[in-house]
Each structure stands twice: as C-alpha cells, then as structure tokens.
Image (tube, rainbow, N blue to C red):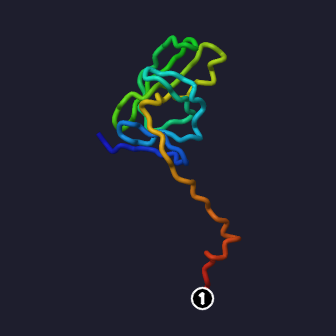
C-alpha cells in the first residue's frame, strides 16, 4: 500500500475536501465561480493537488463537447469534480488542464500568511558577534 504523499500549496484562503479535510487548493488558484456540477455550484481552479484521476471520457456539456476525467480526493476517494483535458470549441479551450471542484464537496477556510523573509543586510537584530 505504501505511504500516502499529500501536498500543500499554502495560502490565506484554503479549499479542502469536506469529507476528510485534506488540502486541495487555495483562493489564488481560483479562476471562476460560475460553473455548475451535479451537486449545484462549482468552481474552476488552475491547480489542485491531492487528487486521483479517472479515465478520460467524452462528455457533452452545456458549453459543448469536452474530454474530461473525474477527480477524487486522494485520501478518502470521494468524487469531487472533474478535470478538462480537451475542448472541441475554441472558445472553451481556456478550461483545458484546469479542474472543477463542486462547491458542496469542498470546504473553504482561513489559511495562514506566507512567511516573509527579512533581508539580513538590513536586519541588525540577527547579526552574530565574532567574539
């Protein structure tokens, strides 16, 4: 079985799997909130981690024909949405390689500020004496 490897992108607003709370993505990766999935509202993201990917399927959607694959949580295996592999309509190609997560299946929460590294040349409080 092996050890489960999970990633974390950081960020000040985080999105996680509602079922098991594993990290998926952050607000800076959000492209659009104007999508609809099987459970209602859905969000389009640039990058999502900690997913398992299903087989590629040809689907006819409201915006045309797309090649997509279902995405599931890597930890608990719950289906969370899908990833666009290919769009036949040129106007829909911006979706390719991006991931839809269904809003009802993810939780948004506060993250944490990124660590700011001080410039050591101007920070005299960290100077070390040579004595």
Q: Position of residue 2 (x, y in %)?
A: 31, 42
Would you place residue 131 above or below residue 24 in this image? below
**Percent from the top left, x then y, of residue 68?**
49, 20
Horizontally, is 13 left or right of 50 in the view? Answer: right
Q: Quadrant of residue 76?
A: top left
| 50 and 113: which is toward the camera | 113
Q: With respect to residue 52, does 88 lie above or below?
A: above
Q: Which residue is mark 1?
A: 131
Residue 34's place in the image compared with 19, above or below, is above
Judged left or right of residue 80, residue 95 is: right
Residue at 45%, 26% (x, y): give it: 81
Residue at 39 percent across and 44 percent down: it is 5
Q: Secondary structure at mark 1?
A: loop
- Please identify the quarter of the rendering in which residue 124 is found: bottom right
* Front in this rendered view, residue 1 or 120: 120
Measuring 58% from the left and 38% from the top, which residue is drawn there? 29
């Amino acid at each position: 079985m092996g050890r489960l490897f999970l990633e974390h992108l950081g960020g000040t607003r985080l999105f996680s799997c509602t079922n098991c709370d594993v990290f998926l993505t952050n607000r800076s990766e959000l492209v659009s909130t104007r999508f609809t999935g099987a459970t209602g509202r859905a969000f389009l993201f640039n990058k999502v981690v900690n997913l398992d990917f299903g087989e590629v399927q040809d689907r006819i959607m409201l915006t045309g024909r797309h090649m997509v694959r279902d995405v599931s949580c890597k930890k608990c295996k719950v289906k969370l949405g899908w990833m666009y592999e290919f769009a036949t309509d040129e106007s829909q190609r911006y979706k390719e390689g991006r991931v839809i997560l269904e809003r009802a299946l993810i939780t948004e929460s506060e993250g944490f500020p990124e660590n700011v590294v001080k410039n050591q040349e101007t920070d005299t409080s960290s100077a070390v004496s040579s004595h």
